[in-house]
């Protein structure tokens, strides 16, 4: 039970072909309040550090290239939560992108003078040179 909202928490798991992705906590957004699109906040979340994912050996061997697209929430407490893969790549590249997204450091969005949670879309490009 979430102590702030009084709502029950539930984990959401999304199956992606070839992988299992933890999408985060549903419902109350970890007690962080409502989540807003960028158009509804006074100041958007500002990314301070966005690590790049590394290739898996299997993806490199199979010469996989492309983009992993993730829909996430930059929570008001500074965590990246509710990660959902919108476009995936095989051989562990989606999991590498998710791991990199979890390490993002950012200043939360602001609405009404308070930090709020905000939806974001992240893209991770995998290219072999």
Image (cartoon, grey):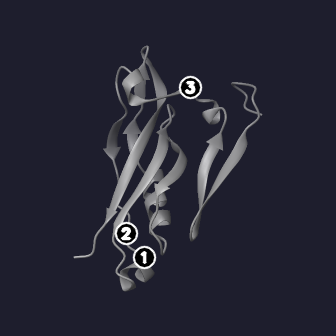
- Residue 54 image label: 2
State the residue at coordinates (41%, 81%): 57
Q: Residues within 10 Å of mark 2 (few under 14, many from 20)?
A: few
The residue positioned farthest toward the top in the image shown: 112
Residue indicated by mark 3: 34
The residue positioned farthest toward the bottom in the image shown: 61
Q: Nearer the viewer, mark 3 or mark 2?
A: 3
Q: Are marks 3 and 2 in contact (CB under 8 Å)?
A: no
Secondary structure of the residue carrying tag 2 is loop
Q: Are marks 2 and 1 in contact (CB under 8 Å)?
A: yes
Horizontal arrangement in the rendering, residue 17 relative to residue 12 (left or right): left
Q: Is residue 24 above or below residue 54?
A: above
Quarter holding the N terminus is top right
Secondary structure of the residue carrying tag 3 is loop
Residue indicated by mark 1: 56
Residue 46 in the image: x percent, y percent? 33, 35
* 45 or 93: nearer the viewer: 93
Quarter location, residue 59: bottom left
Secondary structure of the residue carrying tag 1 is loop
- Please tell me which of labels 1 and 3 falls first in the chain: 3
């Amino acid at each position: 039970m979430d102590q702030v909202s009084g709502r029950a928490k539930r984990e959401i798991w999304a199956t992606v072909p070839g992988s299992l992705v933890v999408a985060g906590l549903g419902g109350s957004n970890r007690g962080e309040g409502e989540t807003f699109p960028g158009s509804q906040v006074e100041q958007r979340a500002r990314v301070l550090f966005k690590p790049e994912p590394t290739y898996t050996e299997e993806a490199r061997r199979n010469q996989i290239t492309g983009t992993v697209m993730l829909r996430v929430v930059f929570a008001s407490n500074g965590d990246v939560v509710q990660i959902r893969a919108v476009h995936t790549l095989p051989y562990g590249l989606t999991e590498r992108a998710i791991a990199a997204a979890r390490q993002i450091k950012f200043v939360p969005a602001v609405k009404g003078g308070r930090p709020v949670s905000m939806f974001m879309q992240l893209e991770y490009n995998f290219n072999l040179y």
